């Protein structure tokens, strides 16, 4: 895909109906939210800033339900601008070997983009 103004943008494929959790929330709550909503990643927010992310991969190992999310969250959060092209997002995911990107815009947290969301580009394009 070449880079031009007609290229697909992250803003068109992100999940904007976002649920966030806090570092002090329990792992059990995170697990219940992901299972109940069918999400595979939750941004961890503290004082209006994204401080981590918890994904279904973090929950593969058995953790005590009452343990805080801060115990397992990834602190090295990768983000992308909502106006970035999906090819930029895909390359970042590929180079970092990750499946979720936090999406930011001028107002802050705009959503989350997963590798599954990028598959929509292939089937719609």
Image (cartoon, rainbow, N blue to C red):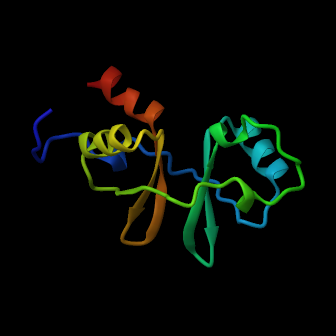
Q: Quadrant of residue 119?
A: top left
Residue 98 spot, x, y in % from top left: 46, 41
Q: Quadrant of the N terminus?
A: top left
Q: Nearer the viewer, residue 82 or 27?
A: 27
* 73 lies left or right of 16: right
Seen at 72% across and 34% down, the residue is 60
* 82 lies left or right of 25: left
Q: Nearer the viewer, residue 58 or 33?
A: 58
Seen at 39% across and 44% down, the residue is 96
Q: Quadrant of the C terminus?
A: top left
Seen at 50% across and 45% down, the residue is 15
Q: Quadrant of residue 75?
A: bottom right
In the image, is residue 104 above or below residue 107?
Answer: above
| Count of picture labels | 0
Seen at 42% across and 72% down, the residue is 107
In the image, is residue 4 above or below residue 117?
Answer: below
Which residue of the protein is positioned furthest toward the top in this rendering? 123
Residue 43 spot, x, y in % from top left: 59, 56
* 65 lies left or right of 52: right
Which residue of the protein is positioned furthest toward the bottom in this rendering? 47
* 38 lies left or right of 117: right
Residue 86 spot, x, y in % from top left: 28, 41
Q: Nearer the viewer, residue 67 or 2?
A: 67
């Amino acid at each position: 895909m070449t880079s031009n103004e007609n290229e697909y943008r992250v803003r068109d494929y992100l999940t904007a109906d976002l649920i966030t959790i806090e570092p002090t929330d329990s792992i059990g709550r995170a697990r219940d939210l992901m299972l109940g909503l069918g999400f595979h990643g939750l941004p961890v927010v503290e004082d209006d800033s994204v401080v981590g992310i918890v994904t279904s991969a973090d929950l593969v190992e058995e953790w005590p339900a009452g343990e805080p999310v801060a115990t397992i969250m990834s602190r090295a959060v990768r983000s992308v601008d909502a106006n970035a092209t999906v090819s930029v997002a895909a390359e970042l995911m590929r180079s970092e070997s990750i499946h979720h990107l936090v999406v930011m815009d001028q107002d802050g947290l705009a959503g989350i983009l997963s590798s599954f969301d990028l598959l929509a580009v292939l089937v719609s394009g």
